[in-house]
Amino acid sequence: MFVRLFMLMLLAGGRAEGRAAAAAAVPPPPTVVERWGVWEAAWRYDIAPPRDGNTGAANPFTDVSLFVDFTTTAASRTVAVNAVRGFYDGGGTYRARFMPRASGGYAWRTRSNILALHNRTGRFDVVDAQRPQNRGPVVVAPGPNATTFEYADGTPFLLAGTTVYGLFGGWGSGSDPNSSTTARTLQTLRSTPFNKVRSMAFPVGNPAAHPDLLPYVPLANTTATTNGSTAISNTTVLDLTRFNPPFWRHLDGVPVCGFNP
């Protein structure tokens, strides 16, 4: 199944027990963030293997839940702003990201079924946007017709779009979004008037061509039974309970390259 990704790119109960280890944020989360910027925090935690004798490692994607609650102060009252879901980024690292829509002081607190990840707290300040290109996300302009777009700061957004279905697949021999076909395509797009790109998030064609292009982790062996005989299948079968972090890091990195020439 292919998923089309529409990118708006400016091309200029009880706590589950686990391995006894502190889940310190690495690196420390920022203390100052621009409005419409990105607050990001990371914590290290190696999930413990199952204790019931089952074979196979515990699944960090399905066995760990992580949320971060954000509050701010308005008119001398603490106001809940948002709650975001954290995610596993591979290598024992969990992350959470948040885009603040208003300036001011914010506090955050984690919620998790893993004691080491639960009740982590901190604070940060959100300042007005400092970079000229930071005008906030594109939204539908208010009005009786609501047929036009604008940036969150009110600047009109005049859409000029194109299609590059394979934008996320041009890695060449590596997974660095700053190299190979992806980078060359982005460089070309920066010299055009296009400010919207429609692309396919998942690879087109044979998904086994490059392991890091698979959105999920492939199963080690796949067997198929035909007329009573069992044989190894040549079809790649993915474990839909385990994301493939290198693929999603690349997916993150391509829009960043587009915003930062």
Image (cartoon, rainbow, N blue to C red):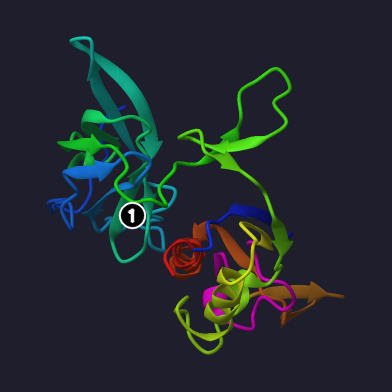
Q: Position of residue 110 (x, y in %)?
A: 25, 35
212 falls in the magenta region? yes
Seen from the viewer's position, the closer of residues 84 and 228 is 84
Q: Residue at position x 22%, y 32% from top?
A: 109
Q: Where 78 sits versus 203, above or below?
A: above
Q: Where 225 sits versus 118, above or below?
A: below
The residue segment tinted magenta is 201-221
Q: Position of residue 194 (x, y in %)?
A: 65, 61
Q: Quadrant of residue 256?
A: bottom left
Residue tagged 1? 50
Magenta stretch mostly in which secondary structure? loop
In the image: residue 148, left or right of residue 84: right
Q: Can residue 60 be seen at all in this image of the molecule?
A: yes
Q: Quadrant of residue 116?
A: top left
Q: Residue at position x 25%, y 23% from top?
A: 72
Kindly identify the amino acid type of the residue bearing the numbered disc 1: Pro
Q: Quadrant of residue 117?
A: top left
In the image: residue 174, left or right of residue 146: left
Q: Residue at position x 71%, y 67% from top?
A: 165
In the image: residue 63, left or right of residue 204: left
Q: Position of residue 89 (x, y in %)?
A: 37, 59
Q: Can residue 220 be seen at all in this image of the molecule?
A: no
150 falls in the magenta region? no
**Which type of secondary structure does the marked residue at label 1 adopt?**
loop
Q: Residue at position x 57%, y 35% from top?
A: 139
Residue at the right extreme? Answer: 227
